Amino acid sequence: MSGRNHRDEAVAVMSRVIREFDDAGTVRRVLDELDFTATGGSLVAITGPSGSGKSTLLHLLGGIDVPNSGRITVSNTDLTGLNETDRTLFRRRHIGLVFQFFNLIPTLSVIDNLRLPLELCGLESDDSVIMPWLERFHLQNQASCFPDLLSGGEQQRVAVIRATIHRPTLILADEPTGNLDESQGRIVLELVRTVADEGTCVIMATHSRSASECADRHYRLSDGKLHESSPD
């Protein structure tokens, strides 16, 4: 299940990254010459108030957004040197995304939601590949279910598996427990922790103290910069 990272190898690097937005004619600098490095096999928690730029930071690392200046590399690939199409192709193969609102495809069963990222990467996607993942995380009985028949915790577990099943080098999780109760959130965090322990770099934006506490490194984003901190 592990990604292809060597533990402690730099996977995601941001160098002097600036991201600004035009807010009703006023330029608002969300990230201010930000420097950041995350390594393989690590779980990094990023906290900060709403609007501080946590999602922006993840979108930049995922190649969904581009900085005004600075350099971003993921697995030694300079994302800032790629066009939008190439960033999409790179993200599809090397990055897994987990969202607060699950974002499963409602018209596909659980197993077909998991089949899709494998097929997009040209990887083997038959049931013998997918079922061990579902069995490992106690979802085998939900394989043929559609997402609206699952609990929120079950949907988010499927979403984490979907982000991991094609073995990316980096997983970006934006408030992965934000819509879950404490017990369901704990199960999802255990899954995220397992993914990191098996070699994948996981960067998680969160407001949750319990999510922060399960991380290896903790940063608080404020005034456009990351400050290493203890769990919030």
Image: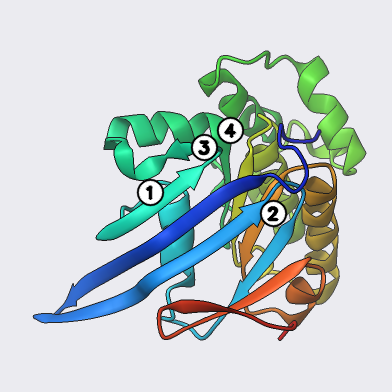
User: Badge 1: few (under 14), some or many (20 or more) residues near its Cα, within 10 Å?
Assistant: some
In this view of the protein, which residue sits in the foreground, 5 or 155? 5
The mark nearer the N terminus, 2 or 1, is 1
Residue 53 against residue 196 in the figure, above or below:
below
Asked if the residue under mark 4 is in contact with the one under mark 3, i.e. CB atoms within 8 Å, the reply is no
Q: Which residue is mark 4?
A: 108
Q: Which residue is mark 1?
A: 64
User: Badge 3: few (under 14), some or many (20 or more) residues near its Cα, within 10 Å?
Assistant: few
Q: Which residue is mark 2?
A: 156
- The percent position of residue 170, horizontal first and vertical second, equals 61, 44
Q: Identify the residue at image location x=45%, y=32%.
A: 90
Left or right placement of residue 82 versus residue 119 in this view: left
Q: Identify the residue at image location x=74%, y=31%.
A: 144
The mark nearer the N terminus, 4 or 1, is 1
Asked if the residue under mark 1 is in contact with the one under mark 2, i.e. CB atoms within 8 Å, the reply is no
**In what element is the residue under mark 1?**
loop
**In what element is the residue under mark 2?**
helix
Distance between the alpha carbons at the discs numbered 3 and 2: 29 Å
Is label 3 or label 4 in front?
Answer: 3
In this view of the protein, which residue sits in the foreground, 159 or 227? 227
Q: Which mark is residue 76?
A: 3
Q: Identify the residue at image location x=75%, y=55%.
A: 42
